[in-house]
Image: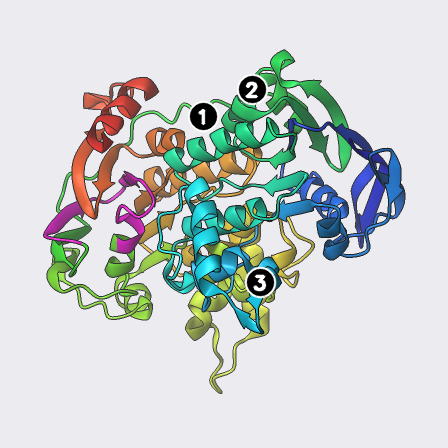
Amino acid sequence: MLQIRHITKSFPSVRALDDVSVDFAPGEVHAIVGENGAGKSTLNKIICGIYTPDAGEVRLDGATIHLHAYKDALDRKINLVSQEIQVIPKSTVAENIMLDKLDRYLAGGRIDWRRINADAARYAEMVDLTAPVTQPVAVLSAAQKQLIMIARALSSDARILIMDEPTSALTRHETDNLLQLLRRIKGEGVTVIFVSHKLEEVLAVADRVSVLRDGSLIGTQPIARLTKEQIVQMMIGRDARTLGLGALTVDAGPPVLEARGISQTGRFHNVSFALHRGEILGFYGLVGSGRTELAQILIGEDRKDGGEVYIEGKRANIQSMADSLFKYRMGYVSENRKEKGLILSAPIQTNIAITVWERLRDRFGSIRLAAETATARDFMQKLEIRATDPGQTVGSLSGGNQQKVSIAKWLAAHCDILIIDEPTIGVDIGAKEYIHQLIWNLAKVEGKSIILISSDMPEIVNLARRILVFKDFAIVGEVRNNGENGAPVRGYDEVSKEIGQYLA
């Protein structure tokens, strides 16, 4: 039994946890839910010794334990799968999985790499990671890196396993596999503390759920006593809004962006599609199906071997992301905001204004800081970014506010075409509502043309009115979700079933 008793933790200007007490039983999946900033990650870090509480105690098997570092938790078989991607890019999959256990494989002063690779392959298979264990991690997707972190934690034989947003970048298949794995290990007596914004997963796998709001414990209940609506109300203090976005009027004129016969050796062969003004075009498919990889070709981050891209009917020559932005006003909101989308150690104003620095220079070439700050304040207000001021570092913001900053920098550049990759990974239900409405307004009100890449089926159905289904680096189907002549959109079950048929 792990017990948290009267835990309080404060940081400058905020009380992250206020007198929180929770019990975690052996052999249960105990979900911790709440909006960004509710205190979930702080609680996890206290259990793992990363933070020391200001008051209260952590008890294990009836005795108070004192955790001063993460190693203290590992010594007691408490392990954490963080929501932050924590891998060594230049090392192999096997090395990353077995990273904290390499000393077990020493023989005669040498490391037995064959044993390491064999053991790592076993844990990789458990989490459905198909990448070869000898492959360097740098070339893998965010989802594959997340699976590596889960495999690493499983290899530690933990008694208490804390999983902080473990499915944020995973496909439905990978998520289903992970939830089945959690059911199995809880049957072996492992306590799983499961943190997720995806309440469908919580309802599917948790035995009990504890809800945090603004650092306080709202309550702990068996999951069988709660509905999704009741959990949401406990989390945000109100019912979730049903947006009812409806039909989207799309310009029937020539395409804003057109890909013709895009080919890349070993990946794409003769892939074509068109994007129209005011359209939200969905890219849906499993991770590794080619959605993000095609987007990277469009913005010049990766090279194609054949085919052409046309912008406003004219052949585009895009050799880099700078060409994409400055020549063709096309921006890309990365799926991996922490590694590629944002500079976490830099202030908000730097992250938002970085795409428009050329506009903000004075006659001597220096960036006008007052103009940079004003630009940041403007978009902080428009996107309701919660922060103390534009000088606050992005790394200190919640996931939802980080994502708003990531979108804001491309809006500041006045992009006409936006590719938005996994827009709501790791954000709470309130921020998700806001981001969905923001994307919708960009298309419907401002006439932006948007490619929406998402592994979240409800998200893609809710927002996209035309969905391209990807499989094995090819577009295998097109699903239309806009009613004819202004009629209501089709139902979720009907659209998701049609998408599933293309993936079968």
> Regarding mark 3 in the picture, which secondary structure is present there?
helix
Residues tagged 2 and 3 counted as in contact (Cβ below 8 A): no
Vertical arrangement, residue 420 with respect to residue 172, above or below: below
Residue that appears at 47% across and 22% down? 242
Q: Which residues are magenta?
A: 268-293
Residue that appears at 90% across and 44% down? 55
**Amino acid type of the residue tagged 2 in the rendering:** Lys
Write down the residue under mark 1. 243
Left or right: 189 as drawn, with respect to 409: right
Vertical arrangement, residue 227 with respect to residue 396, above or below: above
> Regarding mark 1 in the picture, which secondary structure is present there?
loop
Q: Position of residue 82 (x, y in %)?
A: 60, 49
Residues tagged 3 and 1 counted as in contact (Cβ below 8 A): no
Write down the residue under mark 3. 102
Which sits in the foreground, 11 or 431? 11
Which sits in the foreground, 502 or 74? 74
In which quadrant of the rendered image does the C terminus lie?
A: top left
Give the mark count: 3
Mark 3 and mark 1: Cα distance apart in space: 51 Å
Write down the residue under mark 2. 228
* Few, some or many residues within 10 Å of mark 1 (<14, 14–19, 20+): few
**Amino acid type of the residue tagged 1 in the rendering:** Leu
